[in-house]
Image: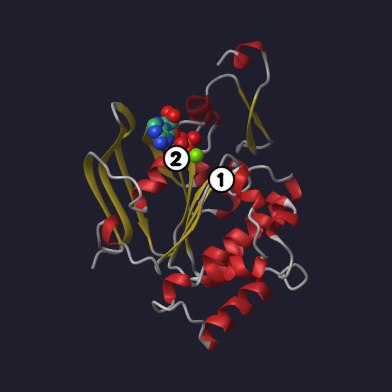
Amino acid sequence: MSEYILEIENLEVKYKEEIALSGINLKIKKGDFVAILGPNGAGKTTLLKTILGILKPVKGKIKIFGNSPSKIDRRLIGYVPQYIKENASIPLRVIDILKMGRYPRLGVLKYFKQEDEIKVREIIEFFKMEDVKNKLFSELSGGQKQRVLIGRALVNEPSLLILDEPTTGLDVNSSEGLYGMLNNLHKEFKLTILLVTHDAMAVSDIVSSVACLNKNIAVHGKPEEVLTEENLQCLYGKHYMLFGHGKIPHMVVKKINKKDESD
Ligand SMILES: Nc1ncnc2c1ncn2[C@@H]1O[C@H](COP(=O)(O)OP(=O)(O)O)[C@@H](O)[C@H]1O
Ligand SMILES: [Mg+2]
């Protein structure tokens, strides 16, 4: 068995004739915390969906836990998809959403055993959701909603957690809280994490490596080596602003000006 949980070689993915990803190489080991940075339309979500077997590559090789994505064991992976507005009004209680995360581990009748109930309770404790567990999902704040969706992914006890821009729409405090929680999961529980994000700050402090994606992966390495102003400008373009102090830019924000409005 290879030392890698995920191995991607020379991957190409197309939507009809449009090439979304090409020449992608990426390897992730057990216990890694990898961030993927890239502008909108760079193919980040496409890459995650290909890893999950939702999209099929036209070229190249992917192995996840030693298998092709089509043979994925759903118990091994927790996936937190990119935030979709429509999901905000899901008419379900928090507890029911958390329980749904356990489905891949239940039998065909979806019967909850004691161990399943215990796991759901553990997640409620870890996320301090005792007060909100009986609330409707639609009544929660943005930060609480994201915690529920991450909780749902973790109830399944995955070996790999994949998150697609989990801080979209969150304020700075909620974002920091969420990254602190991911750091905790990585450090304390040795969880392997693949995170798509725009926040260079979060990645610089807590991840083991950063990959810059724009149809292909130009660089992948330690945060302090990858997060240079030059790399980020190259990735996001000149009309993006990099905030922060010291060597590592903290956050990448699109400048609002006339040119962007016509983009
Ligand atoms: N279902 C789809 N059909 C056709 N083109 C798509 C589809 N989904 C995404 N694309 C295109 O593929 C490219 C990459 O999209 P995506 O992976 O969503 O980027 P990102 O997540 O980095 O913003 C974009 O040009 C997008 O328009
Ligand atoms: Mg996306």
Note whether ligand 2 is within 8 Å of mark 1.
yes
Q: Residue at x 65, y 49 (%)?
A: 88
Note whether ligand 1 is within 8 Å of mark 2.
yes
Dot 1: within a 10 Å radius of its alpha carbon, few (fewer than 14), some, or many (20 or more) residues? Answer: many
Side of 218 relative to 66 (left or right)? right
Q: Earlier in the sequence, mark 2 or mark 1?
A: 2
Q: Secondary structure at mark 2?
A: helix
Question: Tag on residue 110?
Answer: none
Q: Quadrant of residue 44?
A: top left
Which amino acid type is marked by label 1? Glu
Q: Position of residue 67 (x, y in %)?
A: 25, 61
Question: Circle 1 sits on which residue?
Answer: 165
Q: Position of residue 53 (x, y in %)?
A: 33, 52
Side of 50 relative to 221 (left or right)? left
Q: Quadrant of residue 117?
A: bottom right
Question: Tag on residue 44?
Answer: 2
Q: Residue at x 39, y 64 (%)?
A: 30
Dot 2: within a 10 Å radius of its alpha carbon, few (fewer than 14), some, or many (20 or more) residues? Answer: many
Question: Measured along the vertical axis of the image, is residue 52 above or below residue 213?
Answer: below
Q: Residue at x 58, y 13 (%)?
A: 262
Inspect this view and state whether residue 220 appears: yes
User: Do the numbered discs 2 and 1 sit on residues whose CB atoms are within 8 Å?
Assistant: yes
- The quadrant of the image that shows the N terminus is bottom left
